[in-house]
Image (spheres, grey):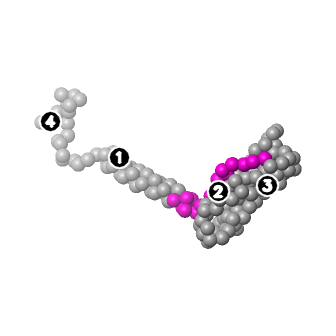
Amino acid sequence: MATSPADPTRPGLPQGRYGRSRDARSDRRLMVVGAVLGAVFVALIAWFGVSYVAGTKVSGELIKFEIVSDREVAVHLEVRKDEDVTGVCTVNTLAEDGGDVGRADFTFDGPRSRIDEVVTVRTTKRATSAQLVGCTAAGGN
């Protein structure tokens, strides 16, 4: 007669006779379901990331700016886009107190995929800085 390891005087169940307990089967099923859901979650996050990056057709960078006068700022932009896309970049200029003194949208089209251009933003008073707000494809694509 077999004894239980916790209590040597009490007989235990014969090993292997009754199969696995219901709790062990439930635990395994939960682990499998959790692994499948985890894999689906990771795949979904990867898909969203790839579609976001692939959907970005226009990007820009402000290389430098120069305060030309009390009413103008020259801004050097570098824009990258697909050749068949028209890009629109927004530039904002700020006064010394941080208030907006000028804002302009610039359109970049044509067959080139990389455009390096100096544009002029007119201001309402002297600007001290310029910033690239962002670039998008014309029509919001």
- Residue at the far right: name it: 124
Q: Earlier in the sequence, mark 3 or mark 2?
A: 2
Q: Nearer the viewer, residue 35 or 107?
A: 107
Q: Earlier in the sequence, mark 4 or mark 3?
A: 4
Residue 12 visible in this rendered orientation of the protein: yes
Image position, residue 3 (x, y; %) = 17, 33
Residue 140 visible in this rendered orientation of the protein: no
How many angstroms separate mark 2 from mark 4 (CA)?
A: 81 Å
Q: Residues within 10 Å of mark 4 (few under 14, many from 20)?
A: few
Taking 48 as reference, is 17 left or right? left
The answer to whether mark 4 and mark 1 are in CB contact below 8 A is: no
Residue matched to label 4 = 2
In the image, what residue type sits under mark 1? Asp
Under circle 2, the secondary element is: strand
How many angstroms separate mark 3 from mark 1 (CA)?
A: 65 Å
Tell me what residue is drawn at x 46 percent, y 57 percent. 43
Question: Which of the 4 image quadrants contains residue 13?
Answer: top left
What range of the chain is rendered magenta? 50-67
